[in-house]
Amino acid sequence: MNKTILVAAAAVALAGLATGCARANASASKPTGSVHELVAVAGHGAHNNYTPLTSPRDAVGQGDLIVEGTLVEVGDGIQVTYPANAALTEREADDYATFVVAVEKVLDGDAGRVVDGKVYIAVPVGGGATTERLTALNPQATIVAVLDDISTWRPVPEATVVRPANIPAGVPLYYAYTDGMWLQGTQDNQMYAIDAEHDELAPAWGGVSDVEGYSGKIEEAAS
C-alpha cells in the first residue's frame, strides 16, 4: 500500500512539475512590462551578505561609476577558473550573468569609462537563472547602478577570470553594489533589486521607492 501511495504521489508531483514548467516557459517568453520576475529568478538561491550603502553620499563615495539607463541585454557571464581546483571551477560555473546597460546619464564618476554608450555588469545569479530565461524576462527595464570597477579582480591570486564573447576586450567590467542596482519596468510602480528591498534602505535615502527617486538622490549627493 505504501508503495502504491508513493507511486501515485510521485505521478501527481511530476504532473504538477510539468504544468509549472510549461507555465514558466510560457511566461518567460512574454515579458510583462514588469521586472519583478526577472529579479526574482536572478536572485533565487543567490543570497549575498553585503554592507548596505548608508546614504546617497555614501554611494557616491563608494562607487567608481554611477549610471542610469536601460537594461538592453542579458548575456553570458564571466567564468572563474581555478587551475589547481577543478571541482571548485565546476561548482562556480555559470554563477554570473552580464547585464548590458545602455547609459542615458552618468550620475557620478568618469563618463569616459562608458564605452560606446554602454557598461557591462557582472551579476551573480542563482542556478536556475539561465541567460535565455533572463533575456526572455527582461522588459528593457530602466536601471540605476552604483558600480565598482572589477576589471582586474580575481577572487584569489591563482584564479583566472574569463570574459565571455559578449564583453568586448578592454572595456571596463563592473560589479554593482547589492542595494545599489535598482530596476523598474514600464508596468512597475516601484523599483526592484536582486536580493534587496527598497524599504530596507537606510533612513538617509528618504524613503525612495522608484528609480527616478533613487537617481535624484544620487544626483543631489554628487553635486
Image: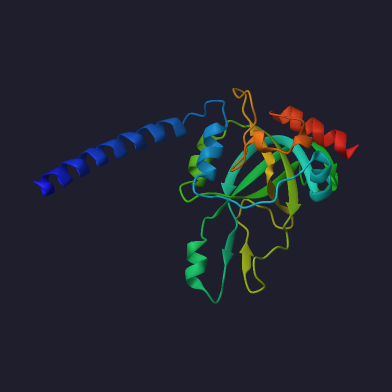
**Rendered location of residue 105, percent (x, y):** 80, 35
Which residue sits at x=54%, y=77%? 84
Which residue sits at x=73%, y=59%? 151
Is 188 drawn above or below residue 118 in the view shown? Answer: above
Q: Is residue 172 visible?
A: no
Q: Nearer the viewer, residue 92 or 210?
A: 210
**Rendered location of residue 157, percent (x, y):** 67, 73
Which residue sits at x=80%, y=39%? 56
Q: How is the image coloured?
A: rainbow
Instruction: Name the outermost residue toward the right.
Output: 223
Is 119 drawn above or below residue 72 in the view shown? Answer: below
Instruction: Name the outermost residue toward the bottom.
Output: 84
Q: Nearer the viewer, residue 7 or 187?
A: 7
**Is 117 on the left or on the right of 72, as rendered?**
right
Count every numbered label the image shows and give the total: 0
Q: Is residue 197 visible?
A: yes
**Rendered location of residue 1, percent (x, y):** 8, 46
Of the 4 image quadrants, the one containing the C terminus is: top right
**Is 148 on the left or on the right of 83, as rendered?**
right
**Rendered location of residue 169, percent (x, y):** 70, 57
Instruction: Name the outermost residue toward the left.
Output: 1
